[in-house]
Image (spheres, rainbow, N blue to C red):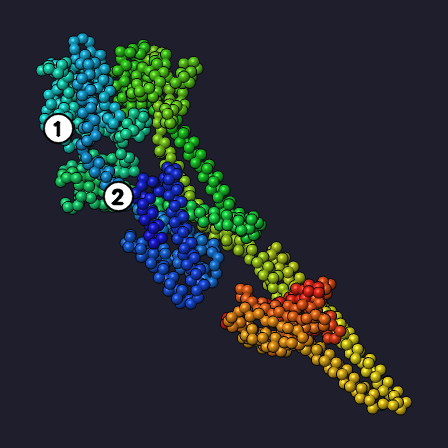
Amino acid sequence: LLALLISESIEGLIVNSSISLDIREVLSLTVSSYFSFLIIGLLFGSLFILLHALVISLNEAGCGLKRFFTILFLSILPAVVYSISFGLLIPLAFFLVLFSTAFLGLKGRQRMSYTIMIAMVSIFAALSTYLILHHSSEREKDRRKLLAVKISAERDPIAESLFLEAEQKLLTDTLLKSYFKPGPLPIGQVRDLAQLYFNGYWEKYNITVNVFGADECPMTALYTTTVKDPLTFDRLIDSVGMFTLSERFFFLDDGSGRISYMARLPIFNNEADIFPLGTLYIEFQSRYTPEEIGYPELLLDKMVKTRTDLSTYSYARYNKGRLVSHYGSFPYELSDSIFSVEAYKEFEFKEAGEFNHLIYRPSDYSLVVLSKPLQSLLQALTHFSYLVLFFSFLALLPLGFRKLLRDKSLGPISFKRRVQLSIVLLLFLSLILIGGGTIAFIISNSNQKNLSNISEKIHSLLIETEYILGKKIDLNQSNADNLAYALTRQANVFFSDINIYNPQGDLYASSRSKIFEEGLVSKKINPEAFYFLSVRKSSEYIHQETIGDLQYASAYVPLRNFENQVIGYLNLPYFARQDELRKEIATFVVAIVNIYVLLLVLVIITAIFLSNTVTAPLKLVREKLSQIRLGKKNEIIEWKGNDEIADLVGEYNRMVNELADSADKLARSERETAWREMAKQVAHEIKNPLTPMKLSTQMLKRAWDDKAEGFDQRLERYTQNLIEQIDTLSHIATEFSNFAKMPKMKSERVELQSLVSSAVDFHQGEGGVKISFEKELFFATYVHTDKEQMLRVFNNLLRNAIQAIPEERKGEIHIRLQQVGAKYILSIADNGTGIPDELKDKIFSPNFTTKNAGMGLGLALVKNIVENSAGRVWFESNLELGTTFFIELPVFSES
């Protein structure tokens, strides 16, 4: 379900929204685009957390075969969901790799390695790339169909509707009517008045106004074609004209492939008049406005999108099998033979010439082809590269926070990590420096190129203009309209608007006067430019100007006549295509990121190899150092080479040899010391019973010599004492024998509670002490130990607890068994005299005792037995309150 949610979310972000996820246009991505990538990354992160937890739980569940088939099934399940959605097996491969990596990487451990993280990031980036490109391709095809329909639509319903409004205003315009009345006609104002009603949306058309009087003679030839007879227009309307919403506005179905309209407007003085004052014939021809001209964008109606962005497409229109119009870089043939489709198919996609072509047949005799370059492998790699970087950032960010919160500080970084980070950071630093420097160079080079272009253009334009105005002494306002028309023609050639100012800095003529009429730009020349041209007498001045948020370069040159007199100033506002600069920068960024992602992979592999090579000897030395044990033979390191590592290894080997010698000397010294101490202890213990034996023997001999009375009774008493002392010597010998050589443990599964109970039953009531055993565990408590030796431990501890209780005190011993994790803890608490603090460190020493009799070997044997059973023993004691001994043993396990 989560996999399907991710697919549907990505599809929704692409298909059902206008958010761009095209990483190739990295500089045009919006905040919504980055949020979308964040959403995709978090969704995939959630999926990985789910899979991670699933694999861990399966590992803990045991049963390797069952675990394997469960993971295999869950590998296929989400991939099948994708395969059903897309009809492809690529997602299946992605998920199989993902689960295989997770299964092998996480088997037996719960920590996620960097290998698993790298595999996760790579797989999710590849899957995201596939999903984004797949859905983007589907959305682009649907969009292309709409564009093809729009291109094929020869009629413009918006223009037909807008003409109804303009028509009523034109027919009732009193100023326009006054122009047809007797008197001198202000040349050009009729056309300007008509154009006043066709701005905004109408900028997509080339508009030509033809004015004929009541005698059907042309009233002006300015801004018109060479047609001198209105019958020419009438015949055109009658032959190919089609009525629209207005009976005075006709669509011209001339098969040219362009949208053409003709307006025929008779102008009456009064509505009741029969004969018109004159007739306006207005021609509308659709045009493609060059991107270099920036002014038209300022005049467009924001409510109506006037131009469809076809910058990434090529298109062609065929009429009756012949090419009638085309646009773009694809070389279309003059006939539509390669684009033939089945008659019943309205849309069809076809690949040819490294382009993908949409073939649309709106009618039996017309055909529209909309073409787009095929997507290359490099473009797919671009998406993958950026997503790898983005997902890596998302993956490393929480790990860094987790380490920071867990350790409270980043702490020291290992030498191996420092080597790897240094190499990777060096690569990133070079990426930033080289990338930033190159982008700065591209921007600077683009600016220099623009300055060179504008300088070249304005000087070419200056030659043309000086040729027209070379004979003029000054700029007469009566010739402004004629010059404006000439400037319009030149603007279409140079793809830039042109302005001319008089020597006083006032606007004289412009190829696009509406900018000034609308008040977007002042009719006065730029003050800074006027200063350089008029005061400092510069031959050329180029600087940056702005209109609102639009920034552009503007060039000025003095305009001279043939007498070398300055008659004005020529201005060329150059709207360099900022989109082209952004695309150039984006193309470079995409290319350099692709290269650096590849380099990053290689550098990371190299960094890992180098760091492992450098740190492997250090790791080996560390492992050998950790394995050094006194009393054992420690291995030396074999190392070939004559470098710093060899010196380090040599010092280690020397230390091992010296340590071995020192250990042998220390062992001999300790053995000698131990034997001396043991001999001293044995001599002391043996000497104690020998002295009374000697005295008793001497007394007995004296009594024998003196023939003392009651000799028989004395002999009996002496014999009894001698036997007791001999028993003491035998006990001493047995104790030392047992301590010197413990019997080999015969470990087996032993039920702990029953063993403790038998020891309690044996000592219950001894010395008047009450022993209680709290059984908190109501199940079998098995440990792995030697039953006889562990019983000896319990007997010894119970005997010591009983002997530690004074005779005047009512003795109580409490025994408690509990389980803590995988351990059993047995506590034996008495209410005896306790152990003084100065004696606590000596309790488990072999020759230490607080009793009048005994060798002090009991607790030493207890410690030895417990530790041989993989456990530990310790005690807590309060003087005059009692002592508690604790024994910890691991729970029995079959493994």
Q: Position of residue 797 (x, y in %)?
A: 65, 72
Quarter of the figure that contains the N terminus = bottom left
Asked which secondary structure carries label 1, the reply is strand
The quadrant where residue 192 appears? top left
Q: Is residue 839 shown to the viewer in this render?
A: yes
Nearest to viewer (mark 1 / mark 2):
1
Tag 2: amino acid: Lys
Image height of 890 relative to 127, above or below: below
Q: CA distance from mark 1 to mark 2?
A: 34 Å
Q: Which one is in front, 546 or 835?
A: 835
The residue that label 1 is drawn on is 243
Q: Residue at x 72, y 62 (%)?
A: 837
Q: Residue 141 — which label?
A: 2
Say whether disc 1 or disc 2 marks the residue closer to the N-terminus.
2
Where does the image place residue 688, in percent across and percent down from the top left? Answer: 79, 77
- Residue drawn 13% across the image and 40% down it: 364
Q: Residue at x 58, y 57 (%)?
A: 618
Q: Is residue 533 above or below residue 839?
A: above
